Image (cartoon, grey):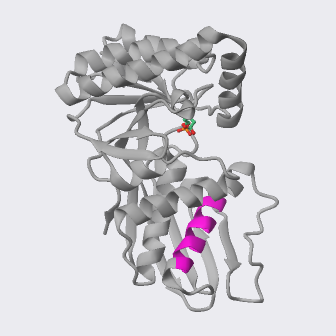
């Protein structure tokens, strides 16, 4: 039974500005989603994924079995469960396409050590891992570029046409990545001492992106702020290439300030960022869309993680190494 895994990610720099064509640098982190998939000849899909908050629900539907609904029937389930199933379902459809078999069924089991829906790229990791494992279950081995591209199409479909290539490329290839428009490439990066903390919430990415757009349209200096983030990312790329972790930390602090100016931080994210800074982190910023969710700090010592664990705003904190490998096959 093939198992494929893919890492989550944090943004070292550049979220939101990337929407306006500025570069961004997401980094894969060594926290993974694993998908194990077995082929079924009866056309059924049986999806068992406690890690996606199914709360014991096994989802069963059929692609080729007329006795079963062809759609996952989840009307009574919470929205987050329905959302998670959309990614898996679209990934399985993509795998059927590459296998040239529109009716093949699958047993799918998904396990995750990433918090789900917290801005750490869990949906991209779910998509990449389940697409790859399902293709392998049909004896098709996808190369990284095809996998990243197909996973991007899957995310776009599951997100009603809205997705950037950053998350899926990062999950497929690992390491530090530079994204500018459709151009995605890997960057050489030193091992970075990431500490991640979550406030237990999650922002609404669409609403936050729309808020930044309104601000940039209303105030030229908000548009300049987006340009300033782009300039900062270019400086950050130099610091990354030089392995200058202290400079990376300073630039992360500035990036957080610029994101706050664009209105996408929150009281709890600011509290986590300041807890990290007070504990001696080299730098700290929110990661992803903001509004709630996660921050990322750099600290080679244990001090930041210990301080965050005690912060009232912190639901969970962990150290995360840069994941050099994206997709892994077992
Ligand atoms: O919160 P995430 O991991 O989905 O990141 C969103 C990043 C944005 O730049 C705000 C939006 C985007 O599509 O790039």
State the image quarter where residue 43 is shown.
Answer: bottom right
User: Does 26 appear in magenta?
Assistant: no
Camera-nearest residue between 325 and 82: 325
State the image quarter where residue 56 is shown.
Answer: bottom right
Q: Is residue 4 visible?
A: yes
State the image quarter where residue 70 is shown.
Answer: bottom right
Q: Which part of the image, by quadrant, shows the C terminus?
A: bottom left
Q: Position of residue 39 (x, y in %)?
A: 50, 84
Could you tell me which residue is drawn at 61 percent across and 76 percent down?
A: 46
Judge left or right: residue 77 versus residue 47. right
Could you tell me which residue is drawn at 71 percent across and 57 percent down?
A: 82
Camera-nearest residue between 77 and 211: 211
Judge left or right: residue 32 versus residue 249. right
Q: Quadrant of ligand 1?
A: top right
Q: Which residue is outermost to the bottom? A: 41
User: Does 95 appear in magenta?
Assistant: yes
Point out the stretch of residues depicted in magenta: 86-97
Could you tell me which residue is drawn at 27 percent across and 29 percent down?
A: 193
Q: Position of residue 65 (x, y in %)?
A: 71, 89
Compared to 245, does 50 lie above or below?
Answer: below
Q: Position of residue 21 (x, y in %)?
A: 52, 33
Could you tell me which residue is drawn at 63 percent across and 87 percent down?
A: 103
Q: How many marks?
A: 0
Judge left or right: residue 147 versus residue 329. right
Q: Which part of the image, by quadrant, shows the N terminus?
A: bottom left
């Amino acid at each position: 039974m093939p198992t494929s895994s893919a890492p989550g990610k944090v943004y070292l720099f550049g979220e939101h500005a990337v929407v306006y064509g500025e570069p961004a640098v997401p980094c894969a982190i060594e926290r993974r989603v694993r998908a194990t998939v077995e082929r079924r000849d009866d056309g059924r899909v049986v999806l068992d994924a406690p890690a996606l908050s199914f709360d014991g629900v096994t989802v069963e539907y059929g692609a080729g079995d007329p006795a079963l609904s062809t759609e996952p029937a989840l009307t009574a389930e919470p929205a987050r469960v329905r959302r998670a199933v959309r990614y898996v379902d679209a990934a399985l459809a993509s795998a059927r396409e590459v296998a040239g078999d529109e009716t093949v069924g699958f047993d799918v089991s998904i396990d995750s050590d990433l918090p789900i829906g917290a801005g750490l790229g869990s949906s991209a990791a779910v998509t990449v891992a389940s697409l790859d494992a399902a293709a392998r279950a049909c004896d098709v081995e996808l190369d990284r570029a095809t996998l990243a591209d197909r996973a991007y199409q899957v995310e776009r479909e599951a997100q009603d046409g809205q997705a950037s290539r950053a998350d899926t490329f990062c999950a497929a290839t690992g390491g530090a990545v530079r994204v500018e428009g459709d151009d995605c490439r890997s960057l050489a990066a030193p091992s970075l001492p990431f500490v991640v903390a979550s406030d237990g919430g999650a922002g609404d990415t669409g609403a936050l992106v729309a808020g930044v757009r309104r601000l940039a349209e209303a105030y030229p200096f908000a548009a300049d702020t987006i340009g300033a983030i782009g300039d900062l990312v270019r400086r950050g790329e130099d610091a990354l290439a030089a392995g200058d972790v202290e400079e990376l930390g300073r630039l992360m602090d500035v990036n957080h300030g610029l994101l706050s100016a664009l209105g996408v931080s929150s009281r709890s994210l600011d509290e986590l960022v300041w807890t990290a800074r007070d504990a001696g982190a080299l730098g700290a910023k929110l990661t992803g869309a903001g509004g709630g969710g996660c921050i990322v700090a750099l600290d080679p010592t244990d001090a930041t993680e210990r301080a965050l664990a005690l912060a009232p705003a912190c639901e969970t904190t962990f150290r995360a190494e840069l994941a050099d490998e994206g997709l892994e096959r077992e």
